[in-house]
Image (cartoon, rainbow, N blue to C red):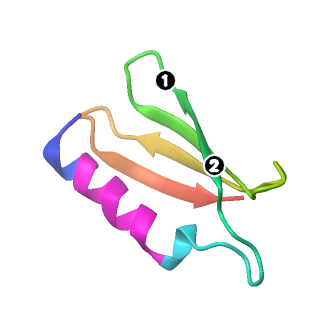
Amino acid sequence: MSRWAGESIHDAILSTLTSAPIGKKIAKFAFTWNADGTVSTIKVYDPDGNLLFTLTFSWNADGTLKELART
């Protein structure tokens, strides 16, 4: 993974894109990985184990982050 991709992930995780919904708290992150070692998804859970949202990552051929979507 390039330095730029790592910085992009860090910045996205700290942004409002990853904020808990109003009145909810984040207690757990669950990661899935692509075969090349890049992050595929991060699932975010509350303390009761309920899924709050999923972050889905897509990558360019050169290893830089192409897109990050929250669903």
Sequence order check, earlier mark of 2 and 1: 2
**Identity, as a three-letter code, of the amino acid under mark 1:** Asn
In the figure, 47 relative to 29: above or below? below
Q: In this view, does 66 lie to the left or right of 29?
A: left
| Residue depicted at x 38% and y 22% | 37
What is the quadrant of the N terminus in the image?
top left
| Residue 71 is inside the magenta segment | no
Question: In the image, is 4 to the left or to the right of 17?
Answer: left
Mark 2–mark 1 contact, CB under 8 Å? no
Outermost residue toward the bottom?
22
Report the magenta residues as a range: 6-15
Q: Position of residue 44 (x, y in %)?
A: 66, 52
Q: In which quarter of the image is residue 52?
A: bottom right
Say above or below: 60 vs 16: above
Q: Which residue occupies 46% across, 15% down?
A: 35
Q: Name the spot of residue 47 as percent of width and height, x first.
A: 76, 56
Q: Which of marks 2 and 1 is in front?
A: 2
Left or right for 66, reference 32: left
Residue marked by disc 1: 34
In this figure, which residue is indicated by the disc labeled 2?
A: 28
Q: Give the secondary structure at mark 2.
A: strand
